[in-house]
Amino acid sequence: MAKTESSDQPPAVLDVDVEGDRVLVAVDRGELSLVVEAPRGIEATDLEALLTDVPEKVETVAELFSGGPDA
């Protein structure tokens, strides 16, 4: 994942909760929120690989529900 920082973006706020063998992480930055539940010992590379295409999938689903990219 490309890491970019912009001075006009608010900082990311993380809220982490560990319950038994699971971890729940909520990340908020401005109008964006992401919640991930994963096994407690997940490797960062595995998590990154899982999330790598999430932005494109979110965009695709948003277009489907709004009538397409030109709507």
Image (cartoon, rainbow, N blue to C red):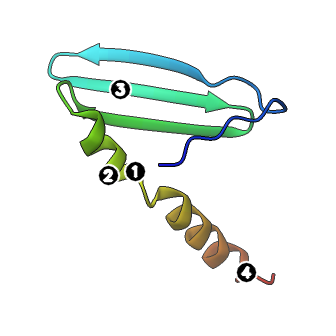
Q: Earlier in the sequence, mark 4 or mark 1?
A: 1
Q: Which mark identifies residue 51?
A: 1
What is the C-alpha distance between the residues marked 3 and 1?
15 Å
Indicate which disc residue 17 carries: none
Q: Amino acid at mark 1?
A: Leu
- The mark nearer the N terminus, 3 or 1, is 3
Q: Residues within 10 Å of mark 2 (few under 14, many from 20)?
A: few
Q: Is residue 70 left or right of residue 15?
A: right
Q: Quadrant of residue 18?
A: top left
**Looking at the image, which residue is at 61% across and 29% down?**
28
**Gap between marks 4 and 1, in whole Å?**
23 Å
Q: Which residue is mark 3?
A: 24
Q: Picture coordinates of residue 43 (x, y %)?
A: 22, 33
- Tell me what residue is drawn at x 76 percent, y 26 percent: 10
Contact flag, marks 2 and 1 (Cβ < 8 Å): yes
Q: Are marks 3 and 1 in contact (CB under 8 Å)?
A: no
Mark 4 burial class by Cα count in 10 Å: few <14, some 14-19, many 20+: few
Mark identifier at residue 49: 2
